[in-house]
Image (spheres, coloured by chain):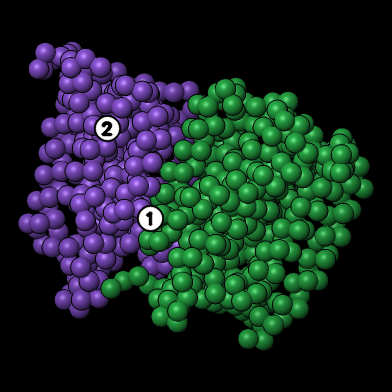
Chain colours: A purple, B green
Amino acid sequence: MTSALLVQSAIIGVSIGSIYILMALGLTLMFGMMHIINFAHGAVYMLGAFVIYYVFFQSGVPYFAAFLLAMILLGAFGYVVERGIYRPIKGGIEPTLVALLALTTFLQAAGYPVFGQLDKHVPPVFAGTRNILGVTVSVERLMIIPIAGALVVGLYLFINKTRLGGAMRAIEQDKEAAALQGVNVDRINGLAFGVGFALAAAAGALMAPIFKLDPMMGEQPLLKAFIIIILGGLGSIPGAILGGLMLGLIDSIVATALGAEPAFLLSFVFIILVLLFKPTGLFGYAAR
Amino acid sequence: MPLGEQMRRVTPLVLVVALALALLVPLLGSAYYLHVFALVFTNVILAASLRPSLTCGQLNIGHSGFMCVGAYTSALLAKHWAVPFELSLLSGAVLAAVVGLAIGYPSLRLRGVYFAMVTVAFVEVIRLIAAIWVPLTRGNSGLSGIPKPNLLGMTLTTKTSQYYLVVALTVITLLVLWKLERSRLGLIWKSIGMADHLAQSLGVNIAAYTLLAFTIGCFFAGVAGAFYAHFIRFLFPPEFGFLVATNILVYNFVGGRGHFVGPIVGAIFLSLLSEPFRGSAYETIFFSIAMLVTILFLPGGLITLPGKLSGFRWRRAAAAPTPSPAG
């Protein structure tokens, strides 16, 4: 592998990693508060991409407006899922996981009759290429990094600087104590669902102009996000960010050298090793 | 528990009647029905083999991966080395169990969600291996030319004989799993699923027993896979994906996790009802709606329906009292 190729795949790795981070952040946030894994995250990513297809490409709405709309619509959907599925099950972890699994397969399968059997494509939003460190990278992929970065910073500020974010952290530390302090646990859980779904929608909306769109497109990013949160430690937000960057880089560099499938197999072997030797995640986060 | 007592007396009767009906299917005289019911029984084996690890409170969303291991192992042994069916089936099942052990050992020591996520990724890994190891598996062109099953040197050429074979395999599987569930081991599994910290404080080695439950399940998933391979005689990696694994889970939840007959009822009911749209997107839509409706409105599954209808609740506890991990 030449050094130019290495730099190029590193840049692409960071950009793919940013997408993974957006996916993993919602998952890890929801796990920290509710001890559930949202299997529907991949399907939400897919829906985010299809919002871009229909609203931006088909209806001609400006890209950023469509992007925000995807986040708002799917964020609201997240709240509805909390209300309609998570809350009625009343904290039974297993039934909740299975219900979310059912929601996932429903959204994926329903995607075929609703969106059609053929793959969809969204034309590029940011055309052209840019020269960085002597290699050429498409602006489309480069733009992912600042947008995702802004969302990550926004999430960080929201969680650490606002009252609602404080309520989320309180629930993460101790649900009962938070409730005793007057935190409306149900509503804040709903908010966490909304935020998680909105971030997944953002990830899908960013990827829409790059990959082809089909109802199963969320499966791979979901698996990657699983790997990331296992690497970073379930519930850890810094772990999700570092893990995402790492996996993005490994993925892109190994995939360039060996192909996409061996890269995935390698990351699976990697998580098995992590589970064997460092089960709390690479960064030593103690899952509560 | 008088109602549990009632269930215990009714269960053998239900199973005997079901078996009698199953043996009558060939009298319908239609190869189509034989084919459909043979697949239904394959699903029964898969559903019942997921039950031990579910009883321990572990959500395995990758069961079809172990079915895939059993299927390819048995098919390749029989095709390339003319290994007799009895032996190839056993090898497939053993290899599935060994792979299960290797995956389960690191991931089962942790809380349930880790395991659930690892199994999801595992299905994808197995599917990818089957797809890219082209010299061995023929990859995504599919493995064809798998010999029909044989017993004691006699090839089972007719659909009827193959159907009786799967009925026999199902009966053996169910008997073994039922015996295990009623034994001391089954009790330990149940205690782990109901309150793992309490069980641990009583000296139960949770990790070892959970791993055993999971490995036994993988073994029988391998049995189902091996039969499937020699019955359909064509293997195609995408057929063992995440969706099939989810379906196996759905059989258990829709049938009901409170009793041994739950997964059996679930597998028969759902496989027969979804038969008209097998293979289309509507099959999945049907499964997922059945699943959501069951979890939200009938958390104990179909087996609690007669009790609810006749006004008395068989086992409210059937809704699996998952211990709250809070704190």
Look at mark 2 in the image and give the residue it sits on: A250
Inspect the image, locate mark 2, and give the three-letter code of the amino acid beneath it: Ile
Q: Which chain's residue wears label 1?
A: B
Look at mark 1 in the image and give the residue it sits on: B114
Residue situated in front as seen by the camera: B40 or B139: B139
Q: Residue at x 58, y 76 (%)?
A: B187
Q: Which chain's residue wears label 2?
A: A
Give the answer, above or below, for where A56 lies relative to A221.
Answer: above
Residue situated in front as seen by the camera: A130 or B217: B217
- Which-is-in-front pick, marks 1 and 2? 2
Q: Quadrant of residue A270?
A: top left
Residue situated in front as seen by the camera: B276 or B175: B175
Q: Position of residue A216 (x, y in %)?
A: 44, 34
Q: Residue at x 84, y 43 (%)?
A: B151
Q: Residues within 10 Å of mark 2 (few under 14, many from 20)?
A: many
From the viewer's perspective, tell me whether residue B86 is left or right of residue B106. right
Q: Position of residue B180 (x, y in %)?
A: 65, 68
From the viewer's perspective, tell me whether residue B296 is left or right of residue B154. left
Q: Quadrant of residue B263?
A: bottom right
Residue projecting furthest to the left: A161
Separation (CA) of disc 1 from disc 2: 22 Å
| Kind of element beneath mark 1 | helix
Q: Residue at x 71, y 41 (%)?
A: B88
Q: Quadrant of the N terminus of chain B?
A: bottom right
| Kind of element beneath mark 2 | helix
Q: Residue at x 48, y 32 (%)?
A: B128
Residue B225 seen by the camera: no
